[in-house]
Image (cartoon, rainbow, N blue to C red):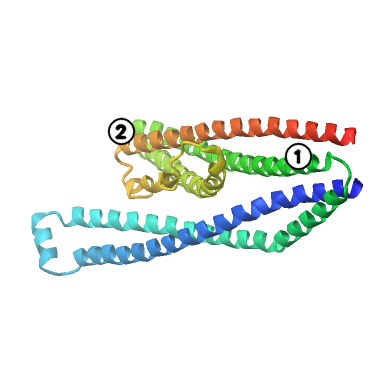
Amino acid sequence: MVMFNELNERLIEIKIELRKKRKWEKQLDLYKAELMNMKEKIYNLKEQLSEEQADVDQLKGIGVTNLLYTILGTKERRIEEEKKEVAAVQLKLKEATEARDEINESIIELQKHLLAVKGLEREYENILATKEEYIKGSKSPNSQKLNQLTEKEGDTKAYLTELNEAIQAGRAVTQTLSLAVVSLEKANGWGTLDMLGGGMISSLAKHSHIDDASSYIHQAQSKMRSFQKELLDVNEEAHLEVDLSSMLKFADFFFDGLIVDWMVQGRINDALERTNTQRNQISSILNELKNKADQQEKELEHVLNEKKQLIESV
């Protein structure tokens, strides 16, 4: 019986690791596909940046178009607009490059995890074969029931682990979004003062908080990428009402040229509203995940009690 219990305990450990292995394999495929898309995006942004910079250089040079804009008195305004477009593309390129590097790091980390669990399937099959022989030779009518309870315990523990990992990833997102909200609220306040004639101090303070918000939004997007990968796996059993495809598009509005035109106070209000909405959506998902985790905790407790009673009765 002692050997049987040891086999069961090891089987539970392997089932949890195998479930992680399947999750990591799925995440690795998703990250690789995302990396290809990000590389293509970076290539297109570099092409766009070259074109935008060429437009600025053309306006600064000598030519018929330049002369016409000078006569019409719109040259400086056009140059300023073109510079804004260059800045917007530079910002998106910076964001995409950082995202590419983070995705690469995630791929390397997953490959390390998968290397560490190589060969687990073979060990799992060997343990099952050993248990089968033990059960066939055992005269106890409870051996089969104990085997079923062990399988259920392993599955429940593995699923609970995934739920808790998803909850942890979601909390990291909401914490960073909360920091972004605080920065945007401060930027909003200073922006209002700036409109009322606050001068250079209020303008500098506003842009400082916008920079902080931009940094937090980037961090949130990075954490959102991990959260989305966790949800893709958990959602097969949790059946959450979540539009997973839209989660990674959240920050696009922030890095899509809006940030270079913060003179418009409405842009700050818009960013604040969107960030609050995203945080509330993530919080709603977290509540559902917590409810699922509570259910699995109760299920696990029931299985463990039943297993304990069975072992004590043998």
Given the image, on which type of amino acid does mark 2 rest? Met
Q: Which of marks 2 and 1 is in front?
A: 1
Q: What element carries label 2?
A: helix
Q: Quadrant of the N terminus?
A: top right
Q: Which residue is drawn at 55% across and 38% down?
A: 238
* Residue 111 in which image quadrant: bottom right
Which residue occupies the foreground of this view, 299 or 217? Answer: 299
Q: Residue at x 80, y 35 (%)?
A: 307
The spot of residue 276 in percent (x, y) is 44, 33
Q: What element carries label 1?
A: helix
Which residue occupies the foreground of this view, 81 or 165? Answer: 165
Q: Residue at x 72, y 35 (%)?
A: 300
Between discs 2 and 1, the one toward the N terminus:
1
* Residue 83 in which image quadrant: bottom left
The spot of residue 289 in percent (x, y) is 57, 35
For the residues labelled 2 and 1, the Cα–Cα distance comes to: 68 Å
Given the image, on which type of amino acid does mark 1 rest? Leu
The spot of residue 153 in percent (x, y) is 73, 40
Residue, disc 2: 195
The spot of residue 127 in percent (x, y) is 79, 56
Q: Is residue 304 left or right of residue 31?
A: right
Q: Quadrant of the C terminus?
A: top right
From this view, report whether residue 220 is shown above or below residue 128: above
Residue, disc 1: 149
The numbered disc on residue 293 is: none
Q: Residues within 10 Å of mark 1 (few under 14, many from 20)?
A: some
